[in-house]
Amino acid sequence: MATALGSRPATYDPHVEPVPAATRRERVMSIDVVRGVAMILMAIDHVRVYSGLPAGGPTPGIFFTRWITHFVAPAFVFLAGTSAYLHGEKLASKGALSRFLLTRGAWLVLLELTVIRLAWTFNADWSHYMLAGVIWMLGWCMILMAACVHLPLRANAAIGVGIIALHNLLGPAIGRVSGPLAPIVYEGGPVRGTPLLVLFVIVPWIGVMMAGYAFGAVTRLPSERRRAICLRLGLALTAAFLALRALDVYGDPRPWHGSRMPAALAFLATSKYPASLLFLLMTLGPILVGVGLAERARGRVADVVATFGRVPLFYYLLHIPLIHVAACIVSLVREGRVDPWLFTNHPMAPGQQPAGYTWPLPLLYLVFALCVTALYFPCRWFARVRAERRSPWLSYL
């Protein structure tokens, strides 16, 4: 998970962050707030995994429970690129930044295949199921960014935007060129001869990270200038989504005209795996608007949300086992036992769901609220540890 590396709070408190004035840089609070919102929303979908409710339907309530979480991965990846730019400001050279991205990316891939996989499943059957989820994808994109940071900033922006805009057109060719790596690069699904199931592919997400890296330069502009750029760019991307989706001629493999879903839901039901152009326009536009609006975020609520945004990987590593344990408790209360289905290969291959298991939607949101509340306290503690101790090892959490 990306961290807001290299940035500092807008209001400096020497009792919280004893950083020498010569090296201190202003922390962009709006990034922490938006990333914190993404962390909170993510927990909704991960509770949904164990609730038995389907992803995206059939009722509007279930559809929007899933749809609102679509903003999470784009925010993670885009702001991971931005964080790489900010972290690079602290380092002596691009070579040092490359080494950091290479080692951090490898660390994320390892975590996905070990700790996170165990947290999802509560079983140790690695020989039949391994998950390549969002942390895996972030890790590989960071490894690729270790090379991309040596390109000029404008080249990162141009290549990143090009990948985002054109990958739906070039997708079949990308798959052919990738050969046996096609499931990892673009197609997703099982990797032949291995137990690996790929949920998040590299293309187009590497383009999103490259664009986020270039966006890092915007975060160093004065606050009102940043705000104006974010609002204009975000509204432009959102307008582009509305126009292209209305035309229904390019940008998503699933047309909304003629769908069996209600028209309003079908219009928003863009493809996430792999993420289509329209999916990314639909999500990145409002995310940038959110960054602009968060420039003026102040008060207790903003501070609480930003706390999650300052320690995203720490939050991620805690929230999946916590939600999984909460689901076991719910099962024990509702059924008088912990259902064996909760120890199968979530989230991609859990097998047949037991009859009558599905939670009502209000229960899903109750468990979500309790879990996020419980997560705040360890996240607040770790955010303070990160602020007070300048150990480079802490940047890996």
Image (tube, grey):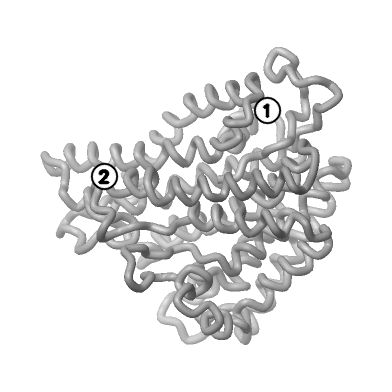
Q: Under tag 2, what secondary structure? A: loop
Query: Which disc number belongs to residue 299?
Result: 1
Picture mark count:
2
Residue 53 versus residue 136: which sits nearer the camera?
A: 136
Residue 333 coordinates in the image, percent (x, y)? 18, 37
Residue 351 coordinates in the image, percent (x, y)? 22, 62
Q: Under tag 1, what secondary structure? A: loop
Residue kind at label 1, given as amino acid type: Gly
**Residue depicted at x 28% and y 49%:** 121
Query: Which disc number belongs to residue 60?
Result: none
Residue 73 versus residue 297: which sits nearer the camera?
A: 73
Instruction: Farthest residue to the top: give it.
Output: 15
**Residue depicted at x 47% and y 41%:** 316
Residue 118 coordinates in the image, percent (x, y)? 32, 45
Q: In this view, does 110 lie above or below 280?
A: above
Q: Quadrant where the C terminus lies? A: top right
Q: Name the residue under label 2.
A: 122
Q: Answer left or right for 291 relative to 314.
A: right
Residue 270 visible in the current orientation: no
